[in-house]
Image (spheres, rainbow, N blue to C red):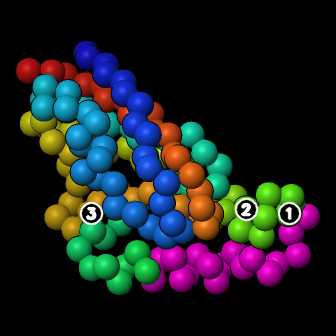
Amino acid sequence: MAWVQQQLRLAPRRRGFHLITAEIEAAMPELERFRVGLLHVFLQHTSASLCINENADPDVPRDLEMAFNEIAHEEFPYVHTIEGTDDMPAHVKAAMIGSFVTVPIAAGSLCLGTWQGIYLCEHRDRGGLRRLVLTAQGETN
């Protein structure tokens, strides 16, 4: 059983759903060594999240952003407002979506479906640098 761990720093992004699969794969070239295993991707922040969703149609991330903005309105009478009007809705969205994804590895590649990708869901207008911890475990060649 082999373990590999890397940290990945993502450049700041605007609010929205951003496909980051290629950045994750580039940060973890050791995936090629794994015959079978798991890649755990953990986001070290509370106002952004990670998800797996469709990677082909650019309308999907736009529609996801629109839907989550309807679910967690900025105009809601939140008590936690010291960090700005976009902060507490960002925490609500992050709590709903989650801070990690786990993807199987087979023959050195992520086992994502044909139309699947890993997204950073940035819930702040200007979320800043985001840090991920990538942990692969499994049997190597």
Up/down of 84 relative to 73, above or below: above
Q: Quadrant of residue 135?
A: top left
> What is the CA distance from the residue labelled 2 to the residue labelled 3?
28 Å
Point 49% across, 54% down: residue: 12
Q: Which residues are magenta?
A: 63-79
Dot 2 corresponds to which residue?
87
Quadrant occupied by the N terminus: top left
Q: Quadrant of residue 120?
A: bottom left
For the residues marked 1 and 2, what is the alpha-carbon distance in whole angstroms? 7 Å
Tell me if mark 2 has few (under 14), some (14-19) or many (20+) residues whose alpha carbon lies within 10 angstroms of its own.
many
Circle nearer the N terminus (1, 3): 1
Which residue is the site of mark 3?
116
Three-letter code, disc 2: Asp
Q: Can you tell which quarter of the image residue 6 is in?
A: top left
The location of residue 5, given as percent across then percent down, is 36, 24
Q: Is residue 50 visible?
A: no
Left or right placement of residue 110 versus residue 91 in this view: left
Residue 57, given in percent of the width and then of the height, sits at 27, 79
In this view, 121 is above or below 104: below
Q: Position of residue 123 (x, y in %)?
A: 59, 64
**Residues tagged 1 and 2 counted as in contact (Cβ below 8 A):** yes
Disc 1, disc 3: CB below 8 Å?
no
Residue found 34% across the figure and 61% down from its top? 19
Pointer 1 residue: 81
